[in-house]
Image (cartoon, helix red, strand yellow):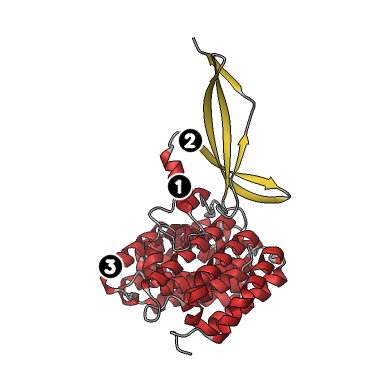
Amino acid sequence: VPLEQQHPCITLFQELWPVISHLLDVYGSLLVISESICKFLKALFNSYREHMLVFLPLLAEKLVLCFEKTEYGCFLWVSGACIRIFSNAETCSENTRASIWQFTERQCLAMFSILNRTNPKEIPDVVDDFFRLLIDALFGHSVCLITSSLLDLIVQASLVSLSLELPDPLISVLHFLRDLLSYSVSSALTFSETSLQLQTIVRNMMQKYNQQLITSIFYGLVYSFPRDCVPDASGVLLSLIETYSEDSIKNIGVTLDLFPSETISSQERTRLLTDLTNAAMQTDWKKIRRLLQDWVAFYRRRVVTPRNKTFRLKNFDEVGFNFDDRHYYKMKDKNYAFPERAYNDVKDMIDSYPSMDFWIENYEFEKQKQQVLAIKIIFSIIFHDNSYDIPVVLWIPLLYPQKAPAVLIVSEKVKAEETE
């Protein structure tokens, strides 16, 4: 069916959508219901592709809201299908691509909020789906993703997710890191006019987290990564050494210092670092890969046993994930194509009143917990020649405007100084 004509199956879907939407609203908290509907939606996107464009704003909004509400990964793999299909510059307009990137940003923000309060080990499937989505986003929107202020948080999310020990999510994280690192060399870039800019941003970002990446991956190779993850982890480690040879080898030395002194002698440490340095000077990356693989295999055979496999590196502070929920309200200069969600509403109000006191807190209502932005405002009134300060708190859910703000008078009238 030509794109100029509406596909008859899309007409049928249009009639079914109110029922599907109602099912998600009422029974979306049941995983079996959400997964079944997501499989249906993903099949629609893969089958009818650009014909689904007419429903894109409606479906994107529903996917975001359902993921924020349920935190189920199935909404992320449907989102990934949207990103893959509607990011093609040859078949999609710039407006569509811009809307898809905004949709991607919102799913990232929702995931960051989850990671801020949840250990990745508790949600390995969601982590897997999220990094698969990021791989699609990096392929279709490399310029937007790399130049976005979210890139730092994405790398942080990668670091905390390297603590996982299941192969599937780990492989997704490592694949994303390898794809991102490929943009640190000019040959990987598609957009020649911005290649130097992208290369510089990626280099600076990975340089910032070089030690944490080296330590996390090196530790994982020795102690925690499943065998299926070793090739990808070695590839990320080698890419870091290729891009930042001196710093990466130095950080390998720092990591070796964190291992128990009785398991590695100073001579072994010096020999490995010397061999790596000499190979890097000769740009012999195959030799570096072989040196690392041989050392890891030797160490594992000699030292690692089921009893000490859970050993943690001494004095190593894992990179925590630090996402400020106020990012929801600091999305500057964004004109969202999906008007149902307006971050700027709250952001503009806060900017207009810099003296406001505001914070993030947990709020429970009807056995449902959610985070809210609490804004405290002091109203001063004069009554019978006395001045009173009345503190009022405005609670704005992070799902605003889908959830209405609530106003709470936090205390009784507080008498201020009497007016003369």
Q: Residues within 10 Å of mark 1 (few under 14, many from 20)?
A: some
Amino acid type at circle 3 is Leu
Disc 2 and disc 3: Cα gap in Å? 42 Å
Comes first in the chain, label 3 or label 1: 3
Q: Is residue 221 visible?
A: no
Comes first in the chain, label 2 or label 1: 1
Amino acid type at circle 2 is Met
Q: Position of residue 309 (x, y in %)?
A: 65, 65
Q: Which residue is mark 2?
A: 356
Instruction: Judge by depth and name the residue closer to the eye, 274 or 84.
Output: 84
Residue shown at 69% from the left, 69% from the top:
23
Q: Which residue is mark 1?
A: 347
Disc 2 and disc 1: Cα gap in Å? 12 Å
> Is 45 on the left or on the right of 141, as rendered?
right
Instruction: Judge by depth and name the residue closer to the eye, 295 or 351.
Output: 351
Q: Position of residue 215 (x, y in %)?
A: 50, 61
> Of helix, strand and loop, which one carries label 1?
helix
- Residue 416: image quadrant is top right
The answer to whether marks 2 and 3 mark residues whose Cβ atoms lie closer than 8 Å is no
Q: Which residue is mark 3?
A: 196
Residue shown at 54% from the left, 80% from the top:
45
Comes first in the chain, label 2 or label 3: 3
Residue shown at 48% from the left, 55% from the top:
342
